[in-house]
Amino acid sequence: MSSPIPKSALPELIRHFVEKCPACGSTQPVGLVEIIKDEKHILLARLVCRACQSALLTRIHVLPHGLWGSVLMTDLEAGELRRFCKEPPVNLNHVLDAHTLDGERLRHLLSPPEKR
Ligand SMILES: [Zn+2]
């Protein structure tokens, strides 16, 4: 189920929500908007700052009493973000498993899928 906000209104909502670029401080930073995930209460979008071209990731919670969210810088492309959204969350066991991998296996897992 998507958020109660019409899809056509999402980019404008995000432009109003993100008031300042965390990288350069621009006060009207949102250029390109790519919706990554639109669920009932959570909206995830990748943005590009029109002033410094930094890629930003915003997560907005759509709540009955208003919107709440955060913005951070990312080096991930939209396709990577969509792929990671489908993966289960990283838990403590995953972290412990990563510490037991040898260097070659870890490099293989961290390499882009097309090189595996
Ligand atoms: Zn910027």
Image (spheres, rainbow, N blue to C red):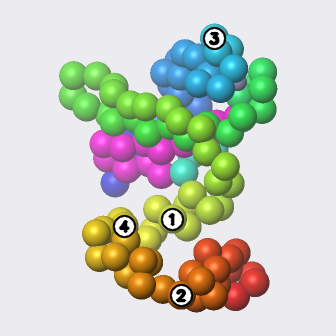
The amino acid at mark 3 is: Thr
Viewer can see residue 8 = no
| CB contact under 8 Å: marks 3 and 2 | no
Which quadrant holds residue 106?
bottom right
Disc 1 from disc 4: Cα separation: 10 Å
Viewer can see residue 68 = yes
Q: Which residue is mark 1?
A: 84
- Mark closer to the chain start, 1 or 3: 3
- Mark closer to the chain start, 4 or 3: 3
The amino acid at mark 1 is: Phe
Residue at 63% across, 11% down? 27
Asked if the stretch drawn in magenta spans residue 116, the answer is no
Disc 4: CA contacts within 10 A as few (<14), some (14-19) or many (>=20): few
Q: Which residue is mark 3?
A: 27
Nearer the observer, disc 4 or disc 3? 4
- Residue 102: give its label: 2
Disc 4 from disc 3: Cα separation: 34 Å
Query: Relative to residue 25, is residue 101 depicted above or below?
Result: below
Viewer-side residue, 111 vs 67: 111
Q: Secondary structure at mark 2?
A: loop
Nearer the observer, disc 2 or disc 4? 2
Nearer the observer, disc 2 or disc 1? 2
Nearer the observer, disc 1 or disc 4? 4
| CB contact under 8 Å: marks 4 and 3 | no
The residues colored magenta run 37-48
| CB contact under 8 Å: marks 1 and 3 | no
Which quadrant holds residue 65?
top left
